[in-house]
Amino acid sequence: MSVSGQRHNAPNAPGQSTLLPGRLLIIDDNKVMRLLLARGLEQQGHSVTMAESGKCGLELMRAERFDIVLLDIEMPEMDGYQVLEAIRGDRALREIPVIITSSMDEIDGVARCIGMGAEDYLFKPLNPILLNARISSSLEKKRLRDEQRELIRMFAASEVADDLLAKGFSLGGQTIQATVLFSDIRAFTTLTEALPASDVIELLNNYYSLMFEAINGRGGVVNQMLGDGIMALFGAPVPLDNPAESSVFAALEMIELIDEFNQQQVALDRAQIKIGVGIATGQVIAGYTGTMQRATYTCVGDTVNLAARLEAYTKTVGQPILIDGSTRQALGKDIQVEECGLVELKGKSQAAHVFIVSVG
Amino acid sequence: MTDPLIDPEAWETLKSMTDSAFLVELIDLYLKDSPQLIEQMRAGLTTSDVETVRRAAHSLKSNSASFGANRLANAARELEMIAKGGTLDGAGLKLEAVEAEFIQLFPVLAELKNEC
């Protein structure tokens, strides 16, 4: 449909040309309504696609990306409720805001649609000022939501982001079986005293990239970074066949990658690093902790403490990877381990069986 | 005094949303569609097809209201409401009222179209 030769007879229509144009889809079986709505929206600078049935509309939504869908309730074959239900049931579509267009005496239907997740409504006959305001507000809200999703993706591990986006956010936890891995750079503080600040950050970033690669490559999720320390989870929030074994493989790769990294550092006459890794398997309490304003997906409990203590204990025994008995039990023959005996770990009332994973 | 066939305020609103070429297209579409919708209502009444009557009345109501043809929109709404109740009791009389309104509206809209 062309927008040439447009005439603005409503001098006070607010928002005109002040907002970014959106890609809108109109689903309405009534041609007069479709055309009228399309024209009103095109005059505001939006690009508009029309569908004459719910089925066509859904097909278009699956083929193209739209910012907003304007949906009629009263349609033959597939009515607005059924379309809304299909949209909400489709993971790829359910984030797209839906504005219900209906006549004034369909208020019950509008309420039902809002209850089903519709974002807003517009009464027919259309009021151009309201139309403009509702579309602007929905586009703005969608833009903010998209930004928020982007931020979640950027700052949370992708598995956590998916979990968050799929199940929604709620503080509160559950007890699950998982493997926890702690890693730390040995003598990082001494190392940094000798280096300029920019080199320290570069070193940390290189270290993190390598560690993330090893951990993510084995299905683990880095959920905390503190200074030069990393806490990673295997088996939560995404289940793994053998989280314990995956974590040990990840630890071995971490050591290997650090060795390669050190060789490069030697060649460049730069500081080398060593890491220690502690791994423990068992029940953990997992969930989002914090406040509604700031929260993180994390695990707490004895298993987490044990992994942290084992990581610290690597310094004492001078071995890069230490694991607990439960992790040991889950390992296959490919991984060589050595008994380290019963060890009294700091903060633990009972001595723990500790094993050394052979490296190289 | 009876209400005007076309509410001037609604007509102005409609004009503000469109340009004249588009308005002409829209009126043509409406003048072509409406007799078909009335025909559907009549057929639905003959075969006691409540759903067809309800749907056609609903469409005519919405379309008419867009042009500010509130008298016709109201007559169509009353017919829609009867059908919504699941029966067609009294629907025949209402359909006559709808037709009478449309017959009066037709020349008025045709005239407005010429002014576009």
Image (cartoon, coloured by chain):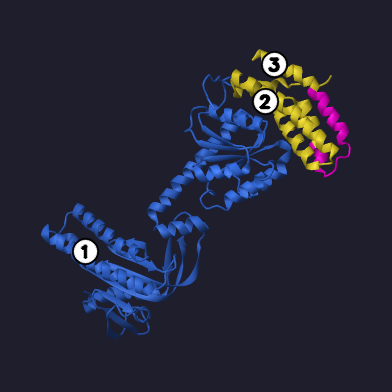
Chain colours: A blue, B yellow
Q: Is residue A177 above or below residue A83?
A: below
Between the C-alphas of marks 1 and 3, the distance is 84 Å
Displayed quadrant of residue A59: top right
Residue at 65% across, 32% down = A31
Residue A82 locus on image (x, y percent): 65, 48
The chain under label 3 reads B
Q: Mark 1 against mark 2, which lies toward the viewer?
A: 2
Q: Mark 1 against mark 3, which lies toward the viewer?
A: 3
- Quick one: which residue is furthest to the top in this view? B115
Q: Can residue A316 be seen here? A: yes
Name the residue type under label 2. Answer: Leu
Classify residue A266 as left or right of residue A202.
left
Between the C-alphas of marks 2 and 3, the distance is 14 Å
The answer to whether mark 1 and mark 3 are in CB contact below 8 A is no
Q: Foreground: A308 or A207?
A: A207
Residue at 61% across, 29% down = A35
Residue B101 part of the magenta-drawn span: yes
Q: Which residue lies under the disc numbered 1? A: A189
Residue B85 part of the magenta-drawn span: yes
Q: Which residue lies under the disc numbered 2? A: B29
Secondary structure beneath disc 2? helix
Name the residue type under label 3. Answer: Leu
**Crowding at mark 3 (Cα within 10 Å: few <14, some 14-19, many 20+):** few
Q: Main secondary structure of the magenta part?
A: helix
The chain under label 1 reads A
The magenta segment is B80-102
Classify residue B107 as left or right of residue A23.
right
Q: Which residue lies under the disc numbered 3? A: B112
Q: Foreground: B95 or A108?
A: B95
- Of labels 2 and 3, earlier in sequence is 2
Residue A354 locus on image (x, y percent): 31, 82
The chain under label 2 reads B
